[in-house]
Amino acid sequence: MQNTSHAVMAQRFEPSDSADDFPTPPWATRALIENVIGVEKTRSMSCLEPAAGRGYMARPLAEYFDNVDVADAYPYGFAPIRDFLTFPYQALSHDWVITNPPFRLAEEFVNRALFVARKGVAILARTVFLESVGRYESIFSTTPPSIFAQFSERVPMVKGRVDAKASTATGYAWFVWEKESNSGHPRLAWVPPCRKKLERAGDYL
């Protein structure tokens, strides 16, 4: 008999060639700026969102950054079609790279983003991204994040859309690399309950 418990059914299993299209609720991006990075660190700064999809992360980023460049490897109609892992972005071409990458490519996105960003990198990923020998050896042992910020609330993500009524059993966190202040000793933080405060009219359109 199939296990249909909520926790099991909420897990994400995508084929290897999937776009992994699970848009980020805009409040979760605002939470990064308001509670983790700090609004003062975005003023007069540029940001690249390289997996922009339909713009659900890029639009709230534009509320804080002076300039937000967008791209995506798939044609969603919002951003230019550019594969972040192969497009010839120049080194240190943007102050920040902030994105919710396809989970299967998150490791490669981090390494590429650290090349492109001048100030910092932030990726939204499942909490289990902390795990695996491969990621430890390729990223965390040599270039650990400066901040690991676990959401205290769930961040519901639905394939192909945002949904204010969705729920999830999956935990998410922001992994942040601040280049100028990265001591090699990650700081554990929590994103406090903030969904009600940071949601805006029109976020789910």
Image (tube, grey):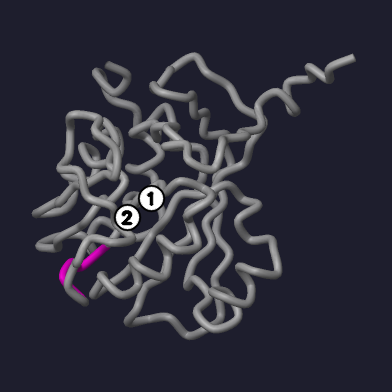
Depth order, front residue of 109/43: 109
Q: Secondary structure at mark 2?
A: strand
Residue 176 lies, in percent from the top left, at: 43, 64
The residue tagged 2 is: 98
Q: Secondary structure at mark 1?
A: helix
53 vs 137, left or right, is left
Magenta residues, dominant SS class: strand
| Residue at figure coordinates x 25%, y 63% from the top left | 96
Looking at the rendered structure, the kind of residue marked 1 is Leu
Which residue appears farthest toward the front when viewing the image? 17
Depth order, front residue of 141/192: 141
Residue 120 lies, in percent from the top left, at: 32, 69
Task: From this view, report whether residue 144 is shown above or below residue 40.
Answer: below
Residue 149 lies, in percent from the top left, at: 52, 56
Q: Are marks 2 and 1 in contact (CB under 8 Å)?
A: yes
Looking at the rendered structure, the kind of residue marked 2 is Ile
Point out the frontmost of discs 2 and 1: 2
| Residue at figure coordinates x 16%, y 44% from the top left | 62
| Residue at figure coordinates x 45%, y 49% from the top left | 124
Task: From this view, report whether residue 127 is shown above or below residue 117.
Answer: above
Which mark is drawn over residue 71? none
**Range covered by the magenta-colored residues:** 92-96
Task: From this view, report whether residue 26 is shown above or below residue 137.
Answer: above
| Residue at figure coordinates x 25%, y 30% from the top left | 76
The residue tagged 1 is: 32
Task: Please tell me which of labels 2 and 1 falls first in the chain.
Answer: 1
Which quadrant of the figure contains the C terminus? top left
